[in-house]
Image (cartoon, rainbow, N blue to C red):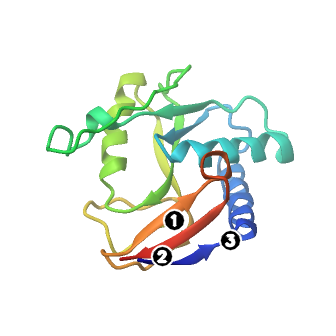
Amino acid sequence: MSQRVLLTSKEINIILHRLACQLLENHLDFSNTALIGIQPRGIFLAERLAKILKEEYKVKDIPLGFLDITFFRDDFGRGEILKANSTKMNFLVEDKKVVFIDDVLYTGRSIRSALTAIQSFGRPKSIELLTLIDRRFSRHLPIQPNYRGRQVDAINEEKVKVMWEENDGEDMVYLVSK
């Protein structure tokens, strides 16, 4: 098994700032927008973006939630025992612009699950998707990100591994080959 670096810590930081600026451009004061990190790995990206928007761009009161999609997955109960994560949504999404945030967009199935799961919290006005890595040739469903950090052309045997300082001790993105 080999791995090569796709993004360094510095490159990730630059991408996060670009994504924050794109969100700011489209949502201005975030008065009617909610950021929702998809559990488990999208929460690190969502927290980082919210922090950048608050500290560097002085955006106040950004609703930030974490959505567990485990029980909405189409492979739930089909062999592998899945571990549920916690959902943290202290607000309703009724008539809000929702931005789903996940680290890697691969087949699109996680996003399909998130679209179903979010209905428990109201009916959003609109839903956008932000992803750090877009594996564009691996999609099973017609789902595309509105905001993407980097497109990666990885073949199916290759895996994109996103490391976060908060969870893994470093910020780095690797392409892992078997």
Residue pointed to by mark 3: 8
> For the point 40% across and 28% down, which residue is it?
123
User: Which of the pair 60/96 is nearer the observer?
Assistant: 60
**Mark on residue 78?**
none
Residue pointed to by mark 1: 133
Q: Position of residue 114 (x, y in %)?
A: 37, 40
Disc 3 residue type (three-letter): Thr
Q: Residues within 10 Å of mark 3 (few under 14, many from 20)?
A: some
Disc 1 residue type (three-letter): Ile
Is 4 displayed left or right of 68 in the figure? right
Q: Report how far apart the C-alphas of labels 2 and 1 lie in the structure.
A: 7 Å
Q: Quadrant of the N terminus?
A: bottom left
> For the point 42% across and 32% down, which residue is it?
85
Residue pointed to by mark 2: 152
Q: Report how far apart the C-alphas of labels 3 and 2 lie in the structure.
A: 15 Å
Query: Is there CB contact under 8 Å for labels 2 and 1?
Result: yes
- Sooner in the amino-acid sequence: mark 3 or mark 1: 3
| In front: label 3 or label 1 | 3
Q: Residues within 10 Å of mark 1 (few under 14, many from 20)?
A: many
Q: Report how far apart the C-alphas of labels 3 and 1 lie in the structure.
A: 13 Å
Disc 2 residue type (three-letter): Val
